Image (spheres, rainbow, N blue to C red):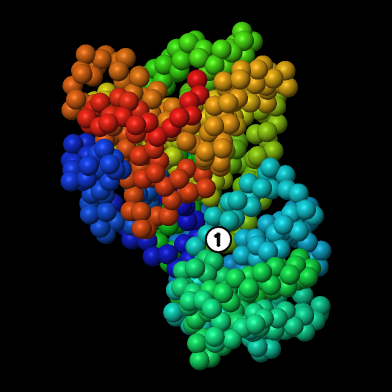
Amino acid sequence: MCKLQLLPLLLPLLLRCSSARHPRDHLGSHMDAAVDACADFYGHACGGWAQAHPSDVYYSQLGQLDHEYTARLVALLQRPAKRHEPRFVQLLRSNYRSCRRQRDAFQATHFVRFLLQWSRSDSDPDAQWSWQPGAHTWRLLALLKLEHRLQLLQQQQRLSAGEQAAVDWLRQICSSWPGYSAAVEADVAEFRPLTHAQFRRLERQLQHGAAQLQLWPQIAQLEAQLSELPEDDSEQAAGKPLAAHRFPEHWLLPLPLQQPRAKLMLDTHWRRYRRRLASVLGARPAPLLLHYALLRLLHKLQLRVPPLFTPHACAAQTHELLPHAAVWLLQQEQPPVERQLAADALQQLFAQLRQRFELRLHRNRHRFAADAQHFLLDKLRRMRLRLSVLPGGEASAERALLEAHYAPLQLTTDDYFGNLLAILRQLPRWQQRQDAEEAQGNGTAAGALQLLLLQPDGYGSYASPYFMPGRNMVMVPHSLLAPPIYWPRQAAVLTQSALGFLIGHELSHAFSPTDVAYDGRGRLGSEQQLRQLQASRRFVRQTECFRSRYQDMADEKFCDVNGLALAYDAFAASSEAGLVGNQSLQQLFFLNAAQFFCEQEEQLPPDSLVHGGSRQRINDAFYSLEAFSRAFDCDWRPRHDCHLY
């Protein structure tokens, strides 16, 4: 999925919005009919994507949805404010304008001071920098790419759910620091140890009173060790020069790069160096490493070109930090009739998918006992689908809820990093309040009346739906219902294919090997209920089949296969059932479902630990469905012999 960038350091984003295409033009321009659908369906459906979007700033169809949604927000935030505008929309404008002002006034020192201030203890946010690590120190060290220290520090510090959310947001804010490969080609000076003069200059810029701790001798000793070549190093050592892209992104530390080959390191040297690095960093106290990493970051940023605070990037950040206000503003621009039409279409589709899955559960191929069968059916019947992070309902009540939600925030147009700090410190409080409301309302019961906090997911995109096991709810972001995924009054086959596949995938998460343990109210099931499920030997055997074959991807593989099958079953049982025998219509169903995952693979690395790459996802799921093989006259050899439900 498209990785979000909140603070676009050195990320030049262009403002180019693609106009919405007609569905048929969209399908034809993205496919490559020369690729055999039976050999590589992803290539058949998406082989034309890169050629159709050669100069666009997004690299996937999902990224296109987010980009165009953000472009609409840019237009709204640049308009003059309306009379009697809600205060929460004024907060949006304040954050956006403070971000845009950075294009002329960005100073790396302000950014590093912001990180330093954020890492202080929440219990005393105005205190001076302490030599003792605060609640966020170990996570901030990982954020600053000193991962070798993480495991030890993780044992010493535990974060609450709210603190973890704030850390994850911060990780996204800092996600686009300059990478190693570009920096090496530009200037290797930043990978040399600091001189005493450089250290004193950087220390004065931070101005946080730590100079009295006499850090220089400790930092000089540390950098001397970091800059040593690995043992047994020689020009005759085995190995090839290590390519720049093989180094970790956003590397901060000095490297043992010595003349005359200052830009090269052998891969054998690199492996030895990484092994030694863990012990070198592990021997230092966490506060020293944090302080040192901040100095190195400041040094690195000052050698780079200042970041670009474009309208698009600032609007994207504003959307992510203040999502409910942004979604409210964007929804006001949508005619109420169209909004209701989309909501009705989505709920009708969800009901169809749920009905198809209920029929599967009634067949009871795993031979569950009555209690286990009741557990699964109750969970399915209680499941809800929600469109948007806003609760809907009466406009006045929704507005009042937003006003109360944002009441604690104070933002200005001239203090960008102060705004970031205020929002990040408010996130844990919002999370705590939501957790308390869920506990009182038993998850789904109170969910309809609440604002939903977005998952602070390093890879999630606004246009990507997700399942919330603690609420037993499928969440569909407002931005998903836009071309090329959704047009008002589009043909049912288009809704049932792309949206059906996506929602069917998320519905399936409730019954995946991991999340099946949650009951219909979003609570972790009792030991007795879990034993009742595990009493089915077939269910246990098939669950282990997914886990042994796909390891960390077991849940996602199950949801891809099951979600596609549910979507096709709902399509076949719909009012168009008489047309399902039409092979062209069946092919249209599968093409449209697959094209949500189109991307420029060389530009957007696959999220391989979670879903697998898009090519792998599409080919694995689609070739597992016999109906697909019939539609394209393929020999059916299912890629999965693991089957749940």
When asked about the image quadrant of residue 487, the answer is top left
Disc 1 residue type? Cys
Q: Residues within 10 Å of mark 1 (few under 14, many from 20)?
A: some
**Residue at mark 1:** 174
**Residue 634 percent location from the top left of the image:** 25, 32
Q: Is residue 575 above or below residue 432?
A: above
Q: Is residue 109 above or below residue 454?
A: below
In the current view of this chain or complex, which residue is farthest to the bottom?
260
Residue appearing at x 22%, y 54% in the figure: 51
Q: Is residue 139 left or right of residue 584?
A: right
Q: Is residue 220 left or right of residue 38?
A: right
**Residue 29 percent location from the top left of the image:** 19, 45
Residue appearing at x 42%, y 47% in the figure: 613
In the rendered picture of this protein, how many numbered marks are placed on residues? 1
**Residue 571 percent location from the top left of the image:** 31, 20
**Residue 483 percent location from the top left of the image:** 29, 38
Q: Nearer the viewer, residue 481 or 383?
A: 383
Q: Is residue 459 visible?
A: yes
When asked about the image quadrant of residue 420, the answer is bottom right
Residue appearing at x 70%, y 59% in the figure: 150
Q: Is residue 114 above or below residue 464?
A: below
Q: Is residue 65 visible?
A: no
Tag 1, which secondary structure? loop
Residue appearing at x 25%, y 15% in the figure: 577
